[in-house]
Image (cartoon, coloured by chain):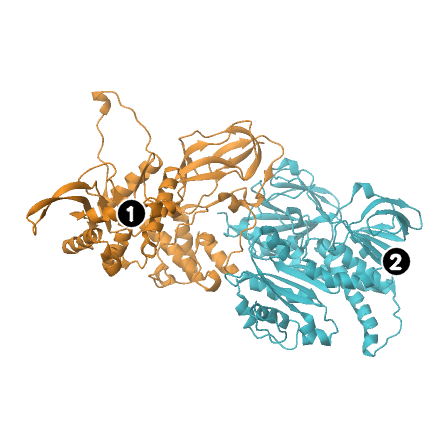
Chain colours: A cyan, B orange
Amino acid sequence: MANPSNLRVAVIGGGPGGYAAAFLAADLGMKVTLIDPEANPGGVCLYRGCIPSKALLHVAKLLEEAEQAKNWGVEFGEPKVDLNKLRGWKESVVKKLTGGLGQLSKQHSVQLVQGKAAFVNSTTLKVTKTAAGGEENLTFDRIIIATGSRPTVVPSLKLDSPLLMDSTGALDLPDIPKTLLVIGGGYIGLELGSVYATLGSKVTCVEMMPGLLPGADRDLVLPLHKRLEKLFSAILLNTTVKSLKDEKTGIRVTLDGPAVKEKEQVFDRVLMSMGRRPNSEIPGLDQTKVKVNQKGFIEINEQRQTADPTIYAIGDVAGEPMLAHKAMHEGRTAVEAIAGHKVAFEPNAIPAVVFTDPEIAWAGLTETQAKEQGREITVAKFPWAASGRAITLDRPEGLTKLLIDPKTERVLGVGIVGAGAGELIAEGVLAIEMCVLAADVGLTIHPHPTLSETMMESAEVFYGQATDIYRPKR
Amino acid sequence: MPTEFKLPELGENIESGDLVRLMIKPGASITAGQPVMELETDKAVIEVPSSIGGVVREIKVKEGQKVKVGEVIFTLEGGVVVETEPARRHEPVEHISGQQAARLAFQLAMRAEGKTEEQALPPDKPQTATPAFSMPVQLGKVAGTDRDPIPAAPHVRRLAREIGVNIRSVPGSGPGGRISEDDVKLCAKNALIAAAAAAQTPRGSFVEPELPDFAKWGKTERVSMRGVRRKTAEHLRQAWNTIPHVTQQDRADITELEHLRARFAPRAEEAGGKMTVTAIALKVCASALKVFPQFNASIDMGKEEIIYKQYINIGVAVDTDRGLLVPVIRDVDKKNIVELAAEMTQLSKKARERKLTVDEMEGGTFTITNLGGIGGTGFSPIVNHPEVAILGLSRSRMEPEWVSDESKFEPRLILPLSLSYDHRLIDGADAARFLRWIAEAFEQPFLLSVQG
């Protein structure tokens, strides 16, 4: 085994997976070069994804609560939105975080190269320095590909118009359109659609499948669907977009679906959010033994090593789910494998969170998967209408559920919908990773009054002994 | 570049097998999950499914050949390849395998904790013997994605990987099957002991004498000793070398029993079995083993302990065209003769059709071998190590028996019994009593319900 401190490692891509890998590699004594088109690490997540969208969703939530406060006897008057200031705040958040990562890179002695990388062979990269200028061939012992993903563009719906936005464009917040069409009812479409709707746009959302957030359990989606029906002007399911036509002041859209009243409608702006594609078209990759599958993902083994032994791949480019936290864990796994540790990427649960209002979060087994696999599970549900904390927040529509193996009583999955579900799911992930039994969750004292009690009470429901709800054991 | 299909891991301790049957030809189109060959390992024949799909280009192995895990079996035409499990496809390059590496890693890990290997290991748990051999019954399922999450905390999974223990083979002692750090260490310790024992016994104590050149005296043919034959040879040599054997002979008058057998045979047939002497012997032996627990035991010389088993699983030697196989019937004491007859019939059929799994040949505590169907008046069976006794049955015959009350000979049906036992644990007098008990149980079946 080579001494890790002599290894020269390149990381292509400075997103969460890339910088997590780079920092750990440096901590283990490797000489690390991190190559990214931006000046500081961050990637899509920090520059054009998770972080800016959460900043805007925070504002959206504030606006909604201010509106709801009327029910509680508090009125603020009509909100005035200063778009420039809002945009500025959002950008300051991004700057603060990416700047911080730049600092951390220095502290870890990770060499940042602003530029683009192409493969010359399995160990050599041709780096085009976009900021400093010039090209250089650099040789490494190991290379980690962390190039991430980009929004999917459907060829038949290609249109050269500034009014057609992808998630990146929408986060730039160019204006608040009177009408906005969101194509795709996945988490990106619903999150950004919510932002624009609370800022004042009339949002129409079309989804090809019979429900929003395909893949998530229906009982978790239902409370969100109900709320979005009020927030959006229309949610059109089983609906496809046939064509887009630029009309200068708007985009003429042809829709096809059972609930479509007007086949042709003009929207001020259109947001295309139909998923993301892996960025595996790296120049010169064919000079290596790396294999890319039909979906465009780089093929990897448990150590995140590609078919080319010196090259590893992590994050969105290496497979679903395309989530920053999965990428970070993979990045650390890959680096440890490079250092010669016997490791594998083997999580029992990768949490998923949709940051809408209410939030939806799940981890481990879902009911949908259990049904597909034909495996027997017991689902213990605790509706938030019985949670004191949820009532004080005037948000009783939430639900917490545990998916339990009836034989071993192990917690195999957790699903939550409701305010703050994204924070609550962490306990579920820990439960699944630690092989916790429903009894362990039920016997752990949870602080009162908090939403976290719904985890404990779900476990009590499993035994037919919940304090705050009457659910005798069947 | 053509894609290669390599022989996947088949289970703990299985490193190779003999290729019995190939189920594909060059040019054939196969899908992932489709069985491609039959492999004979440790007495079981396993169907091995492909993990990849496409058109077969070249087959790199031949029927009858020994194939090792990781060896290339066939290649596919380039082009579209459907992977069932891309993540497991490439072996890590700096692959360390084998007991040596595992041992080294384990010692290093323990040293890092500031402990010696012995200190680090948990106290012995008598009820946990060497972890049960876990054989994926349906290999196709292993390749799927719907495997249960491992019931162990992340740091325990990591420890297992570091010391070379397959976490899926570790029995969890905690609630819900949770695997603790100690479970993993115990499993590693048992594996090391087993490896050390395997390394010592055959080589250390026995060297095959060199053979003369047989061709000097005439034509010969050399045939490779594969699968069952080789395994039987190794196992019996080891049993013979380890156990000081003694064989006790006795005879049982089964004239009455034969009437009963004929009378109740239709019941067994209804249940799908045959009311054979073996089926009855199973019941008789199970009862005898309860009365004489030292015959249902094993010896642990390393720890100087006797292991008494609180379950009665009896193996029955079955003669097949591939050689001797010993399927094991579990919890014999809890089953009636009709049930035993049905199970026996089913297992023999499986044995002959090569469908027995390794699982079905493990865990025996005593063995019965019946040569009566062929003939003979008695023989010395070899004890199926690590068991301590085996009962041989020969052909029952009408014999003149002296009836002293009436001062005359009477024709009686006599079953010859041969009991071989491990003299280290069992004294001659005990063996004589045990076998007499069995003979009497055959003679007076009522005894079974009174004493058994």
Tell me the amino acid under the disc marked 2. Asp
Q: Residue furthest left?
A: B407
* Mark 1 residue type: Arg
Is residue A196 found left or right of A473 in the rendered image?
A: right
Above-or-below relation of A353 to B246: below
Question: Marks 2 and 1: same chain?
Answer: no
Q: Nearer the viewer, residue B268 or A87?
A: B268
SS type, badge 2: loop
* Element carrying mark 1: helix
Q: Which-is-in-front pick, marks 2 and 1?
A: 1
Whole-percent x and y of residue B430? Answer: 17, 56
Which quarter of the rendered picture does the N terminus of chain B lie within?
top right
Q: Chain of mark 1?
A: B
Residue depicted at x 66% and y 72%: A451
Q: Which residue is mark 2?
A: A175
* Residue B448 at x, y percent in the picture: 25, 56
